[in-house]
Amino acid sequence: MTQLLQTYWPALAIALALGLVMAWYLFTATRRTRVAGTVRDVLDEGAAPAERNRALIDSAPAATRDPAPAAPAQSGGDDLTRIKGLGPRIAALLGELGVTRLADVAAWDEAAIERVDARLGRFRGRIRRDDWVGQAKLLTSGDEAGFADRYGRLD
Amino acid sequence: MPVWFELAVTMLAAYGAGIAIGWGLWGRKGADTRRDDTRG
């Protein structure tokens, strides 16, 4: 055995070196994830950027979605949503048509009802179904008891 | 036992020893310094 080692030590050294090269190749050269630099965190940049971000998060949004349009959109108009079956969206729609007062609704004749009804889109038919004209007449006359009798209590 | 067989076994052993040394040098170190890729 010792004679073998003495005779063939260069071959054994080459085998050992080959093993080392193979190990280096396996454990280092083919490693996919390399540690390249350090990951920078926002806090590494100091407190100022973090505070700025915090302030941006806490600040009020730059743009907000409008809630449902307020019922008495036009100045001097009545609250048309007092009419049962007439909500803020329809009130805004009527405002665009120039109808802002309960008296306007109370004064509608059949032709006016047809004209407005045609503009109500998916709310079409509500004027007659909920008797807006009758409601508006009672509301403009101030007959709340009569209104409550016929259409239910005012909210 | 023939000499060529002894030589082959010894060379294989040397090769294995080389890999073991390499694993000690580079293999274990890599396991310790594995990066956390879930951050950042």
Image: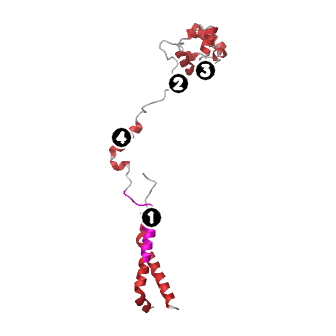
Mark closest to the chain's N terminus, 1 or 4? 1
Residue A28: percent from left, percent from top: 42, 67
Mark 3: few, some, or many residues within 10 Å (few <14, many ≥20)?
few
- Which residue, given by chain and number where applicable, does mark 3 sit on? A121
Residue A21 magenta: yes
> In which chain is the residue bearing label 2?
A
Please name the residue shown 62% across and 11% down the image: A113
Q: Amino acid at mark 1?
A: Arg
Mark 4: few, some, or many residues within 10 Å (few <14, many ≥20)?
few
Are discs 1 and 4 both within one chain?
yes
Q: Which residues are magenta?
A: A18-37
- The answer to which image quadrant residue A115 occupies is top right
Mark 1: few, some, or many residues within 10 Å (few <14, many ≥20)?
few
Q: Amino acid at mark 4?
A: Arg
Please name the residue shown 40% across and 90% down the image: A6
Eye-nearest disc, 2 or 1 = 1
Residue A10: percent from left, percent from top: 40, 84
- Which residue, given by chain and number where applicable, does mark 4 sit on? A52
> In which chain is the residue bearing label 4?
A
Q: Is residue B35 above or below residue B24?
A: above
Q: Secondary structure at mark 3?
A: helix
Give the distance between the C-alpha atoms of the residues marked 2 and 1, in whole angstroms. 60 Å
Are discs 2 and 3 both within one chain?
yes
Residue A18: percent from left, percent from top: 43, 77
- Which residue, given by chain and number where applicable, does mark 2 sit on? A68
Number of numbered discs: 4
Mark closest to the chain's N terminus, 4 or 2? 4
**Viewer can see residue A55:** yes
Q: Secondary structure at mark 4?
A: helix
Q: Secondary structure at mark 1?
A: loop
